[in-house]
Image (spheres, rainbow, N blue to C red):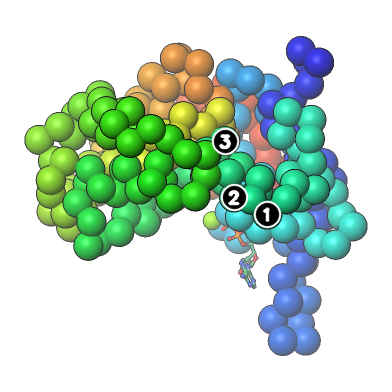
Amino acid sequence: MSNTPLLQGIDLRKTYHLGKTEVPVLHGASLEVQRGDWITVLGSSGSGKSTLLHLLGGLDRPDKNSGEVLFHGESVWKKTNKEINEYRNSDIGFVFQFYHLLPELNVFENVLLPAMIGGRKTNNDMARERAASLLTRFGLDHRMLHRPRELSGGERQRAAIARALVNKPEVLLADEPTGNLDETTGNEILDVLQGLHQDGLTIVMVTHEQQIAERGNVVIQLRNGVV
Ligand SMILES: Nc1ncnc2c1ncn2[C@@H]1O[C@H](COP(=O)(O)OP(=O)(O)O)[C@@H](O)[C@H]1O
Ligand SMILES: [Mg+2]
């Protein structure tokens, strides 16, 4: 069992339907993530990078009868709805290009949110402690009570990373996490990810920039719907 990949996409196919038009995006993409990997998927805009991450993270389903997502060797889509929600909420952490912080909550509340909703019941005090310690680790202790709009882009992304980690996921999925940031700030975010990786976190990151992809320890290309 010890060499079972932590996360696996097998022969993933995804076609979007726009009215009667079919938009095939993934044509049998497979990928293996071992515990401790930092995999970057490099692909041009529109190549299906976000689609691939959504499938891996259980946010979207592959086409009917086409491929599998396995977590610890178990099919994600054969889980019950409750288990799939727990998978999205607790096993996987998601970081997006545009942060997706809720504007009406302060930074601390944003980070705490995944621990409060759905998923596996977490002890309230422990979750609050963890949210605060993640924010402190990422240099945001003085920003906890601020609204996201009062933060810079880099600070927002660090808050979003803290939110992604609050439930102690086994894998962090990052969708162009530096795509909305200038180069210096983007590098700071990549340094944060590198620190987390060095601490043992497994990361799958997608990007369209070669230079960013090279920060990972395994670089794979997504082209023509396959990797
Ligand atoms: N919900 C959707 N409905 C229809 N087409 C979509 C949808 N999401 C993505 N697409 C199309 O699928 C292709 C791949 O999208 P995406 O996975 O977002 O690529 P990337 O993240 O690499 O830029 C694009 O051509 C995009 O327009
Ligand atoms: Mg994308």
Which residue lies under the disc numbered 2? Answer: 85
Q: How many numbered markers are drawn?
A: 3
- Whether 202 is drawn above or below 70: the answer is above
Q: Which residue is mark 3?
A: 91
What is the crowding at mark 2: few (fewer than 14 residues within 10 Å), some, or many (at least 20)? some
Residue depicted at 52% across the width and 39% down the height: 120
Horizontally, residue 170 falls left or right of residue 98, namely right
Residue 133's quadrant in the figure?
top left
Tell me the quadrant of the picture where the C terminus can be found: top right
Q: Residue drawn at (41%, 28%), measured in percent from left and top? A: 193
State left or right for residue 59 relative to residue 210.
right
Structural distance between the alpha carbons of marks 1 and 2 = 6 Å
Q: Are marks 3 and 2 in contact (CB under 8 Å)?
A: no
Horizontal and vertical percent position of residue 180: 34, 52
Does dot 1 land on a helix, a strand or a loop? helix
Query: Where's residue 128, x and y in %?
Result: 27, 34
Q: Secondary structure at mark 2?
A: helix
Residue at the image position 31 percent from the left and 43 percent from the top: 111
Residue lying farthest left? 142
Amino acid at the residue labelled 3:
Asp
Q: In the rendered structure, which amino acid carries the disc numbered 2?
A: Asn
| Residue 180 is at least partly visible in this image | no
Assess disc 1: are there few (<14), some (14-19) or many (≥20) residues with their C-alpha within 10 Å of its C-alpha. Answer: few
Which residue is the site of mark 1? 81
In what quadrant does ligand 1 lie?
A: bottom right
Badge 3: few (under 14), some or many (20 or more) residues near its Cα, within 10 Å?
Answer: many
